[in-house]
Amino acid sequence: MEEKNIILTGDRPTGRLHLGHYVGSLNRRVQLQNSGKYDEIYILIADDQALTDNADNPRKIRDNIVNVVLDYLSVGIDPAKTTICVQSGLPALHALTFYYMNLVTTARLSRNPTVKSEIQMRGFAEEGLPTGFFIYPVSQAADITAFNANVVPVGEDQLPMLEQAREIVEKFNRIYGETLVLPTAMIPENEMQRRLPGVDGKAKMSKSLGNCIYLSDDSKTIKKQVNGKMYTDPTHLQISDPGHTEGNVVFTYLDALCNDDLFAEYLPEYANLEEMKEHYRRGGLGDGTCKKFLINVLEETLSPIRANRAKWEADIDSVYDIIKTGTQKAEETTNETLAKVRKAMKINYFDDRSIVNEWNELLKQARQ
Ligand code: TRP
């Protein structure tokens, strides 16, 4: 098999993307896109996967496709370099899922730790578990293999999906012959970037907790989230008190976002974050000053994104064309993989008439 470097990533279109997505994954996708090291890059808007736990609310998925694409375009995903495509427009993925399901036991699916905790979170343990949700790791293996992706940049919570995809690939290739590319997960190197906490210090940004900073938030909303909700150090009561920077959300965000140039511009008392942290720990640096600096850092990060978004929002026709063209290109790629898979399984009956000879031969032997 020819060795190409192909990236696939994906998101469920269930809401606008936030700063946690940016720091943990979007920013890196843009860097990978611009590195010039990859032959093909795809981003899949996994609307079918999103339906596995939103069957009663297709409207939510339909509405958020545009939000997610706008978020991609505004952070710098360039449709000339990255193909953005929509899962429901790629029927080959469904067919692959159906074949791969035979290579995975229900016992194996039940052990997937990410799916296990999602089942708890969604209350499916009591209400009943939709079969489609239970098997979505198989459909994700179809996504990955259909694009021949060898590199899949994901967060840590997706490692069990990659493990299952690899098992499916190995089993398929063992039974039907070397056909599918074995994918590898690429997870963020930087500990801080693996998971940005919510502004309230809870482990995850989530819409229902109201602790997100969205990429599309305006300056006023950002100020409100930081000044009104951001968790600092509860033992740091007076400015003169020594403070803790560990577990202090203001510093966690600064760790993830700031650089020395931003100090020169907005807080020249310090050369870098280390100096600022030392002062905070010693005592004498107030939370107000820290938050004000963070707001400037957030503005620096988010205002160009916001400006890009406004441009794209004014031209939704082009946004539509981008994902339509992307989906058409992806359809070709994924159909090719499906054809290869059917051929390897020898179920490609209608590619040619060779099976007529086979059947004639079989019947002749039976008559003898
Ligand atoms: N399950 C992924 C998530 O929730 C989204 C996804 C769907 C995906 N298909 C994919 C990620 C393929 C990587 C590759 O984030």
Image: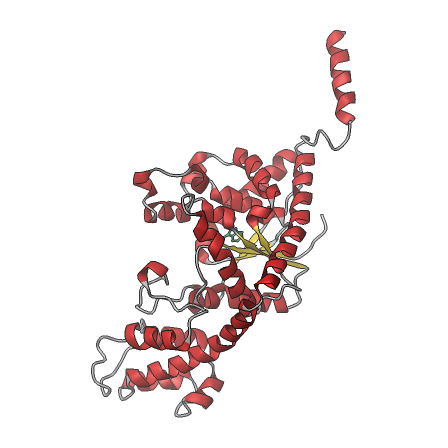
Q: Is residue 341 left or right of residue 22?
A: right
Depicted 322 relative to depicted 224: above or below: above
| Foreground residue among 176 and 7 | 7
Q: Is residue 80 left or right of residue 276?
A: right
Q: Quadrant of residue 171?
A: top right
Question: How many marks overall?
Answer: 0
At x 43% / y 66%, what residue is drawn?
20
Q: Residue furthest bottom?
A: 269
What is the quadrant of the C terminus in the image? top right
Depicted 175 relative to depicted 330: above or below: above
Q: Is residue 235 left or right of residue 126?
A: left
Task: Evaluate whether residue 245 shows in this view.
Answer: no
| Foreground residue among 11 and 303 | 303
Q: Quadrant of residue 170?
A: top right
Query: At which x and y percent is residue 323?
Result: 60, 57
At x 77% / y 22%, what residue is drawn?
356
Query: At which x and y percent is residue 1?
Result: 71, 47
At x 51% / y 65%, what residue is drawn?
71
Query: At which x and y percent is residue 24?
Result: 47, 65
| Foreground residue among 114 and 289 | 289
Depicted 112 relative to depicted 75: above or below: above
Here the colouring is: secondary structure
Task: Evaluate whether residue 88 shows in this view.
Answer: yes
Depicted 133 relative to depicted 71: above or below: above
Query: At which x and y percent is residue 135?
Result: 47, 40
